[in-house]
Amino acid sequence: MALKNEPLKIYFRKLPNHEHGSLFWNYEINPKDKKDRFDITYDVFGSKSLTKADKDPRGGIALGELFTYDVNVKDNIMHLTFIKRPGEANEEVVTYKVNLAEPNAASKLDRSYAQDWMYFKAGAYNQCNIKPTSSGCTNNGIEAGDYAKVSFYKLELDQ
């Protein structure tokens, strides 16, 4: 039975006064009761927990800097590969391996995704595109630079 959870969500987060943004991914636990859902965060380049007061995450990714990611699920194992500056002499590679048929060790509530259907979607989902939020996020319009843009150079889905 599909519970409409998302075992993988990839994020890029850049703060206004930083030159570099942070790339991280979340694993949403799959509990018996959907009210118990929460995400477990894995930093890839930079850190999700940065604030405006923190220094620029030099280990992060600058706007316009290329990165790639590959998600390969085979025999219940989700293989993730992230590459910053792909093909360049100074490229950085970070990998993860997650067994979706076993509960995540970080949560006693997780039941795994062994019996769920999987689907894929890609896009830019701007979290500050409609109205001010409790986080202080405001939308001042495209002219003020408040918008989201993403470019996918290649999407490939194999079954």
Image (cartoon, helix red, strand yellow):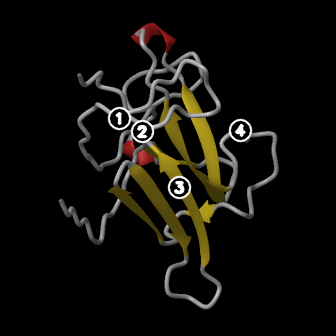
Give, as a three-letter code, the residue at label 4.
Ser
Which label lies toward us, 2 or 3?
Answer: 2
Q: Is mark 1 on a helix, strand or loop?
A: loop
Report how far apart the C-alphas of labels 1 and 4 lie in the structure.
30 Å
Residue count near mark 3 (Cα–Cα under 10 Å), binned few <14, some 14–19, many ≥20: few
Q: Name the residue under label 1.
A: 114
Q: Name the residue under label 2.
A: 101
Q: What element carries label 4?
A: loop
Which label lies toward us, 3 or 4?
Answer: 3
Report how far apart the C-alphas of labels 1 and 2 lie in the structure.
4 Å
Residue count near mark 2 (Cα–Cα under 10 Å), binned few <14, some 14–19, many ≥20: some
Give, as a three-letter code, the residue at label 1.
Ala
Q: Percent position (x, y) of residue 32?
A: 42, 13
Q: As drawn, is 95 to the left or to the right of 101?
A: right
Q: Do the residues labelled 1 and 2 touch (CB within 8 Å)?
A: yes
Q: Tell me: residue 88, above or below residue 47.
A: below
Q: Do the residues labelled 3 and 4 touch (CB within 8 Å)?
A: no
- Furthest-left residue in view? 159
Residue 152 figure quarter: bottom left
Q: Percent position (x, y) of residue 44?
A: 62, 56
Q: Name the residue under label 3.
A: 97
Q: Mark 4 points at which residue?
A: 49
Q: Tell me: residue 65, above or below residue 112.
A: below
Q: Are marks 2 and 3 in contact (CB under 8 Å)?
A: no
Q: Nearer the viewer, residue 81 or 58?
A: 81
Work out whether mark 2 precedes mark 4 in sequence or the reverse, and give the earlier one: 4
